[in-house]
Amino acid sequence: MTPPPTTATPAVDHGSAVVHAPAHAAEGGIGHFLSTYVFSKDHKVIGLQFLFSTLLWFLIGGLLALAVRWQVAWPWSDVPVVGKLFAQEGGQMAPEFYTMLFTMHATVMIFLVIIPILAGAFGNFLIPLMIGADDMAFPTLNMLSYWFMWPAFVCFGASFFVEGGAASGGWTSYPTLSTNPASSPASGMGQTLWLLGLTFVGVSSMLGSVNYMTTIILMRAPGMTMFRLPMTIWAMFITAVLQAFALPVLTAAGFMQLSDRMLGTGFFSPEGNVVNNAIAGAGGGQPLLWQHLFWFYSHPAVYIMILPAMGMVSDILTVFARKPLFGYRPMVYSIAGIAGLGFIVWGHHMFMSGMNPALGITFMVSTMMIALPSAVKTFNWLGTLWGGKIQFTTSMLFAISFVSMFIIGGLSGIFMAATPVDIFIHDTYFIVAHFHYVLFAGTAMGVWAAIYFWFPKMFGRTMNEFWGKVHFFLTFIFLNGTFFTMHILGAVGFPRRLADAYHYETFHHLQPLNAFMTYCAIGMVATQVIFAANFIYSMFWGPVAGRNPWNANTLEWTAPSPPGHGNFDYQPVVYRGPYEYSVPGVEKDHLMQTDPPNAAAVAAAAAAH
């Protein structure tokens, strides 16, 4: 496939530059309802489809988390709603169902929320707009990238209701727990559906990554060089590269585990598998092989789940600090460095596997090296804020919170990088605290910042700032009340994945702290009702936004709000970088990327007269 050619139409006078309107702008792109809004090939509609779908699964994943927290805080007590649906006796949660809950909570949040909302929703909506293109390079492939998510939605959702229940081998699905239906209740039909769902998510992401790379490389507007791209696009581009190289490994591993389960092969099982009540295969597989293949994808996946948020937060900070991004090129190189190092550190998830100590030290040192490009980004964000004319909008509050939460998560990660420390805290709540600070307290804050920031471009209206700030402050308080205390639990060895840790007398005194965390988790989920109400109300009745309500300078703010089919009513031509704020002699304090080189001089002369 080759990207569609751009056909020029008659010139349009736009300010002091003469440019050409894209062909799509003249077509309008309005057709049958199904082709316009359901099976749409318009990148903006596809982005919104990803957004609405992932927000729904975000709610489901949050409710699963509440059920987990309830069981940990008050073991074997009656669980509201969940206990009635999946009760062992009365309203109590069945022990097997607890393992299904934490398995599916992690699965939903990682594969159906974080990755698709960052790469799918914002990647689809923003990439063509921010590079000045009229659509993605391959619109049909783009449509398929969304609809390949639906079999995954069905597989993961249906797995709760099949015989034996959903997958309960953890989101890591380690053999032999997950491969032999005869030896483990965790590997029934639900586990097969889990593997199928994972495969469909992988295909969806690979289709998207090919499209993103091609679009960014080949379809940039005239004058949009690579080092005039906003950080959001750099982050999406490097994320697409990560997906393209890492996802095939996980997809192949998923097929191998399916083959072990259904055909009796022996890739990961040291003993023969049971297929149709008969021993099949001679065994001889290696369970550790799955761990290597799984983490070779899943550690880069950590950066797939954080790099887009880093890019979007970088752009948001500059807009509301009214300053250029501090160290633009080092920021680009640091993202590339994080991605490159992310491919050689997967073994730090396997320190407990009995690996050679020399190999463990190699993984330990390379993991610690990732702190260097991460520190570059952190200090550059702080440098951007320093001395700025900061506007504390809801989006800016969430963006600043992203930086602070990422610092906490990153610092706790350094402990786990050290092999001797990791041996002690492995499978304790310290690990849970770390990845929730990075992937929820960090990434979710970045997602909320992006939603509030680009909502006017998506729907042509702005969200309510008062209720947005209420949403921020309550979320911030409850979030830290939930996750920061997990560090304390982990430091004293409180185990994760156990339905009743209080069975051990050592942990009895920690019950009040767990109860406090659960109350905070309930408050955090309840707070999202404010966000949902604000989001839905503002879609229809929020204040009408102009093209550029935030006085930003990147290309998407030159398009109508919301953009029509073809995005731009003229062909943008780029003359400058994406962060020209507080420009001396310019009355409006910033220059758009489309302002010609003499714009500052013209504006200064006009002001002098």
Image (cartoon, grey):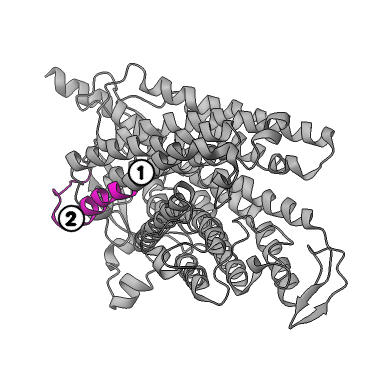
Q: Residues within 10 Å of mark 1 (few under 14, many from 20)?
A: some
Assign the C terminus to one quadrant of the image. Answer: top left
Q: Which mark is residue 427?
A: none
The residue under the point 15% across, 24% down is 606
Q: Nearer the viewer, residue 42 or 346?
A: 346
Foreground: disc 2 or disc 1: 1
The residues bearing labels 2 and 1 have C-alpha atoms spaced at a distance of 28 Å
Give the percent coordinates (x, y) of residue 435. 53, 41
Kind of residue at badge 1: Tyr
Q: Is residue 489 visible?
A: yes
Identify residue for label 1: 519
Determine the residue located farthest toward the left in the rendered image: 609
Residue 284 versus residue 14 in the image, above or below = below
Q: Secondary structure at mark 2?
A: helix
Give the percent coordinates (x, y) of residue 412. 56, 30
Determine the residue located farthest toward the front in the rendered image: 505
Report the magenta residues as a range: 525-547
Asked where in the image residue 34 lies, by quadrant, the reply is: bottom left
Whether 533 is among the magenta residues is yes
Q: Secondary structure at mark 1?
A: helix
Q: Earlier in the sequence, mark 2 or mark 1?
A: 1
Give the percent coordinates (x, y) of residue 198. 58, 64
Assign the N terminus to one quadrant of the image. Answer: bottom right
Identify residue for label 2: 537
Give the percent coordinates (x, y) of residue 353. 77, 45
Q: Nearer the viewer, residue 496 or 513?
A: 513
Q: Is residue 450 visible?
A: no
Kind of residue at badge 2: Tyr
The residue under the point 66% across, 37% down is 341
Residues marked 2 and 1 touching at CB (< 8 Å): no
Q: Position of 353 compared to 244: left or right?
A: right
Residue 165 versus residue 464 in the image, above or below = below
